[in-house]
Amino acid sequence: MSVIVKVLELSGILDGIRGNELRREVSGIVADGADILLIDMKEVKFIDSSGLGALVSAMQITRNANTKLFICSISDQVRMLFELTKMDRIFQTFADQDEFNRQVLATQ
């Protein structure tokens, strides 16, 4: 059985407006039957609190659908925010898509 993996690449600032888009995109991906969702944040420059909330919502949406959620390519600023808010304990993050592919997809 093949595993359906979707990659969502975010860019710019993850704020309330972009966060609402993110929720809709994640809901759509889950509705399409993805088994694994990777959010690539390589191009994200900044996250505010509502952006962080949107990521938590995305985690809840995927969890409810038995879809696995991973995040990769976070900047130092975002990593610091994750550590300060203990989000690093909630989200499994990878350095980049290659590391994700090696560690997650190779074991599927």
Image: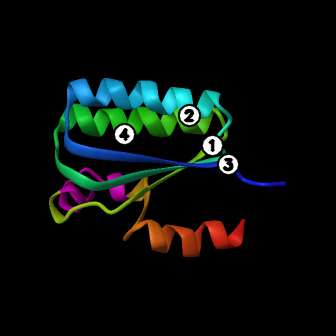
Residue under numbered circle 4: 55
Give the residue at mark 3. Answer: 4
84 within the magenta span: yes
Q: Which of marks 1 and 2 is nearer the N terminus?
A: 2
Tell me which residue sits at (56%, 34%) in the image: 29
Distance Cα–Cα, label 2 vs label 3: 10 Å
Q: Compare residues 62 and 6 and report the one nearer the observer.
A: 6
Tell me which residue sits at (38%, 54%) in the image: 40
Secondary structure of the magenta portion, mostly?
helix
Residue underneath mark 1: 67
The residue lying furthest to the right in this view is: 1
Residue 61 picture location, percent across and down: 53, 31
- Residues in magenta, as a range: 78-88
* SS at circle 1: loop
Q: Taking 87 as reference, is 39 left or right?
A: right
Instruction: Count neighbours of disc 3 (C-alpha within 10 A) and say few if under 14, some if 14 to 19, many if 20 or more.
Output: few
Along the polypeptide, which appears first: circle 3 or circle 4?
Answer: 3
Q: Distance between the residues labelled 4 and 2?
A: 14 Å
Q: What element carries label 2?
A: helix
Q: Give the amino acid type for the residue marked by disc 4 in the picture.
A: Leu
Q: How far apart are marks 3 and 4 (CA)?
A: 21 Å
**Which residue is identified by label 2?**
29
Asked whether disc 3 touches disc 4, contact meaning CB atoms under 8 Å apart, the reply is no
Q: Earlier in the sequence, mark 4 or mark 2?
A: 2
